[in-house]
Amino acid sequence: METTRRDGAGLTRELVRRALAVRHEDLPGTVRQVARDCLVDWLGCTHAGEQEPACRIVRASVLEEGGAAQATLIGSPLKVGVSQAALVNGTASHALDYDDVNLVLPGHVSVAVIPALLALAEYRQASLSEFVAAFVAGYETACRIGALVEPAHYANGFHATATLGSLGAAVACAHLLKLSESEACHAVGVAATQAAGLKAMFGSMAKPLHAGMAAQTGVRSALWAQKGFTSRPDALECAQGFVLAHGQDMHAHHALAEPAGGHHLLNNIFKFHAACFSTHATIEALRELRREHAPSPDQVQRIQVTAGTPCAICNIPSPTTGLEAKFSLRAASAFALLDMDTSRLDTWDRVTEDAVQATLERVRVELVPGMGLSESVVALHLADGRSFERAASVGSPMADKAEQSRRVDRKFLALVSPRIGYDRSLRILDRLTAMVDDASSSASLTDLFLDCRA
């Protein structure tokens, strides 16, 4: 085995070697459980997001292009080419910004990896147990590369979901295709030279497109590598390669270190507010203040939100659409103070209502260095002179994984059952649980997709 130095020499090959060694039967039960939850959460978000404008446009374009009927579009009986399905389903899964996150990147791994892997698994008739092993391999690789390149990569304006997600998707697909170590390194290189996505696009249709692009790039890169397409096998660490072209941080020792609990997947955070993750700490702080002190909105003279400078991504000051509201600390604060259910998709479209706008105008946001994406301090200043303050942090996953699964399942049912019915939605959950738990399962994904049709 090639030794990887602290300067990153041999890093691409070492990360690929570790990923290709992942086996379903060796995964701890908690890792398989979280993988199952990621798939459930992804399916729910995708099913609910496939009618969003961004997805409708991308899907219409794909259907106009035409192609082989290889992989299913979620929520539809339609099949398109594998890379086309990855693009459409990936865009749909991130359209609501309700999908899970991992702060090592920081970004959304599942929406980049799962649509690529599912399309390929369906086409190649792979079992769900094969899917789970490949998903863990790709997820862990994306997080390890996140540890390698952050914080410079994200600070320079790159959306890690798009860039690092494409690399994780390529490795996941390489695992499913059983590529050789050399072929998988080439797949990483092909994905690395295509990886793109700007944080400046947050609050627009281009942000969910990033997930679709990453998924499409990943599956194409692996399929091309299987056919003999070559690239640099050291694309991550080489001079003018992925790492140094996207920033100046190359923390090889962080990339190779074992994460807490043995898997980065165990630090996956599921979202239960339908908006940018960086608004969640503010929402939680305001909910606590409302529970403890029960101020009426009319009593509140000013809401002061203090968050970290990275939260500039969700600081649209005057949102006029639901999509913009999802990236507005002021809008999130208004919804929380007014006791509006931020887990509901339609709440965010109510941003132009008079009560929301009146409350939003009383919110002041200060972004300071030293605080992260998952932290917030909120102070309520009342007209009678009283003030209340609460700090919140949402940067840790739920410790109780069984309760986490229950919450993810409830979220799935809330997103999907209005479209396909409660019984069919519950049947999907039961099938996924059984298939993921069975290490020897050879069950096909076909029935799962048939059940998902709206």
Image: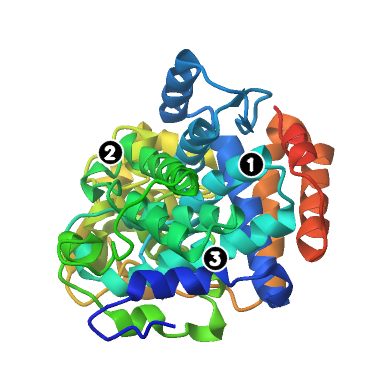
- Percent of width and height locating residue 49: 53, 35
- Percent of width and height locating residue 6: 26, 86
Residue type indicated by callout 2: Pro
Residue 394 in view: no
Residue at 84% in and 39% down: 423
Q: Is residue 35 left or right of residue 299?
A: right
Residue at 24% in and 54% down: 158
Give whichever of discs 1 and 3 has the lower sequence position.
3
Give the residue number, with chain letter if any, for mark 3: 137
Marks 2 and 1: CB-CB under 8 Å? no
Marks 1 and 3: CB-CB under 8 Å? no
Residue 216 image-quadrant placement: top left
Give whichever of discs 2 and 3 has the lower sequence position.
3
Residue 306's label in the rendered image is none
Residue type indicated by callout 1: Leu
Q: Secondary structure at mark 2?
A: loop
Residue 415's label in the rendered image is 1
Q: CA distance from mark 1 to mark 3?
A: 28 Å
Tag 3: Cα neighbours inside 10 Å, few (<14), some, or many (≥20)?
many
Residue 319's label in the rendered image is 2
Q: Secondary structure at mark 3?
A: helix
Q: Nearer the viewer, mark 2 or mark 1?
A: 1
- Percent of width and height locating residue 218: 44, 48
Residue type indicated by callout 3: Ala
Location of the C terminus by quadrant is: top right
Q: CA distance from mark 2 to mark 1?
A: 24 Å
